[in-house]
Image (spheres, rainbow, N blue to C red):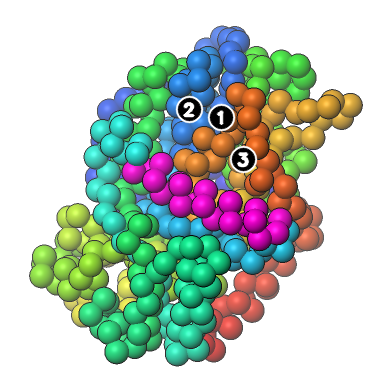
Amino acid sequence: MPRPLLATDRELARNSYYDATARREQVFPSLAGDTRCDVAVVGGGLAGLSAAIDLRRRGFDVVLLEAREVGSGASGRNGGQAIHGLACDQETIERQLGLDAARQVWDMSIEALDLLRQDIREHGIDCDWRDGHLALATSARKGRALQAWAQRTATVYRYPLQHIGPGEIGRWIASPIYDSGVHDPRSGHLHPLKYTLGLARAAAAAGVHLHEQTPVTALTPGAMPTLRTAAGEVRARQVLLAGNVYQQGLAPAIEARIMPVGTYIACSEALEPQLADSLIPSRAAACDTNFVLDYFRTTNDQRLLYGGRVSYSTVTPADLSQTMRRRMVRTFPQLAGASVEYAWGGFVDISMNRAPDFGRLPVAGAAASNVYYLQGFSGHGLALAGLAGRLVAEAMAGDASRFDIFARLRHRAFPGGARLRMPALVLGMAWYQLRDMLG
């Protein structure tokens, strides 16, 4: 992918509700000169910050380099939903790793939710956390599939979920388009930028050396890998690449295994409290079960935040605010008189099979690599990124047993090469969107 992705992303995020309602109380200096450390982290999002905090707890000297501001990527502008599991079906993990390892992966995804809550408490992060998540089916056929999935999840993964049948769905969501659903009280939602900035404050307080406005231009592997920037270099014993789609050119061996996908969110004007309460009475986060899904939640200041448009070509939808408003009103016709006050977007990284892609860069002639990477969260990384940071910190400290469960997952490059992989993906996604529309 060409480097203008960063500039495009900045433009998309300009009218973000999160930026308007979160205070950036700290500014971290750009790197000037050369330095050495135990671990250098590239990327100031949830994965990079979480790893840096855990590494400091273990006594490592850590330098973190962020191309823009901490939380400026997907970590600070996503839908804010922290949900069990992965972006892919558990059957994907079962086919590759077997049932026992798949159970370990599932259990770690639940640990990720506990870790998120722990971080909020430990670091005193005010980020509007609320419990609860609804998965919603848009047809009777999809409702039966959702119920079967919930039953299997309870049986195979020992994770019970509350089934909501057609006769009671109206008590959970005031929308005419849903047939049934499933409720998970352990998942939830938050203000992602407030959370990410809270982790940055915690990292700085722990002694992590954070540098914003410091894009990494080159990585030279070796016994002491070197990261080059415009104004200096960092030499480290170990490196973590946690920049996802924004670190083009640093690691060509894994770059083609993820694809930048544009995601878009709108936020309504402040609603009357009674109306806001009526939309989702439990105040849970919600999403449908379509392959190209819609997701939404009410905020603490009585707005509806609604995501659901994606672009697999990096081309921004025309008239984004009105496009998103139409989707919002289709789901909640009672909001026909409400305006959209914010509409923004940005890029997330998806893998071919939507499973996370964690591992080490291959090094010719070396027994083991000292350059780790975390990518491929596929739009499901709010909780998982924190756990990924912990797993890579464990591995760097000498215990890679849990990290290597994920590292065993096999990933393929997107077909078509740099020129054709986007058109191929657009065609493939059009098929899934048609399947969603057909019910």
| Span colored in magenta | 97-117
Q: Which residue is mark 3?
A: 402
Horizontal side of 26 relative to 292 (left or right) equals: left
Q: Quadrant of residue 396?
A: top right
Sort mark 1 into few (<14), some (14-19) or many (20+) by Cα contacts within 10 Å. many
Horizontal side of 303 relative to 111 (left or right) equals: left
> Is residue 90 visible in the rendered structure shown here?
yes
Q: Which residue is mark 1?
A: 393
x and y percentages locating residue 406 in the rendered image: 65, 47
Residue type at mark 1 is: Ala
Label 1 near label 2: C-beta < 8 Å? yes
Q: Return the disc, 2 or 1, that comes first in the chain's sequence.
A: 2
- Separation of marks 2 and 1 at Cα, in angstroms: 6 Å
Q: Quadrant of residue 295?
A: bottom left
Chief SS of the magenta region: helix
Q: Return the disc, 2 or 3, that comes first in the chain's sequence.
A: 2
Element assignment for label 1: helix
Report the disc number at residue 54.
2
